[in-house]
Amino acid sequence: MAALLKNTDVRCRIDEDLKERVTAVLSACGLTISEAMRLFLLQVVETQGLPFEVRVPSDKTARALVQAREIRSRFDSIDELLEDLDGKEAPQTRRKQSAKPKTSHSA
């Protein structure tokens, strides 16, 4: 016997004008709002994120993106990256901060 699927409700508040416009577009595609939302949620899972690009980040998000770029590590080779992921030290200084590369001076 096939397993019974358990459904749950998800609610979303939108203004009436938006609902009417969305319903018209989706109806032309042969979809209801519920079917379109189900497809959207499946794509979120499939892509592990939003299935479209969000173009204008908030100030907070923009600052977080800049900070993430500044602190990310750079590697000279795949081996160095894999060693870093394994938590091992490479024979040479292999990790470089993207914001300011370190330079060594010999005496």
Image (spheres, rainbow, N blue to C red):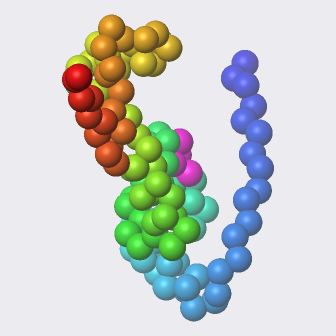
Image-quadrant location for residue 16: bottom right
Chief secondary structure of the magenta portion: helix
Q: In the displayed structure, does residue 107 sit left or right of residue 39?
A: left
Residue 49 in view (yes/no): yes
Across and down, in percent, residue 1 comes to 72, 18
Across and down, in percent, residue 79 comes to 29, 13
Q: Which of 39 and 90 is in front in this view?
A: 90
Residue pictured at 31% horizontal, 36% vertical: 102
Across and down, in percent, residue 90 comes to 36, 11
Q: What stretch is highlighted in magenta?
A: 41-45
Q: Nearer the viewer, residue 80 or 99?
A: 99
Identify the residue at the far bottom of this view. Answer: 17
60 lies above or below 96: below
Identify the residue at the far front of this view. Answer: 107
70 lies above or below 96: below
Q: In the displayed structure, does residue 51 sit left or right of residue 40?
A: left
Residue pictured at 40% horizontal, 49% vertical: 70
Report how many numbered discs are placed on residues in the image.
Answer: 0
Q: Which of 21 and 92 is in front in this view?
A: 92
Across and down, in percent, residue 77 comes to 23, 20
14 lies above or below 36: below
Image-quadrant location for residue 76: top left
Which quadrant, please, contains the C terminus?
top left
Residue pictured at 70% horizontal, 77% vertical: 13
Residue pictured at 38% horizontal, 61% vertical: 53
Q: In the displayed structure, does residue 78 sit left or right of residue 63?
A: left
Query: Is residue 44 rendered magenta in the image?
Result: yes
Q: In the displayed structure, does residue 62 sit left or right of residue 53?
A: right
Q: Which of 49 and 96 is in front in this view?
A: 96
Residue 39 in view (yes/no): no
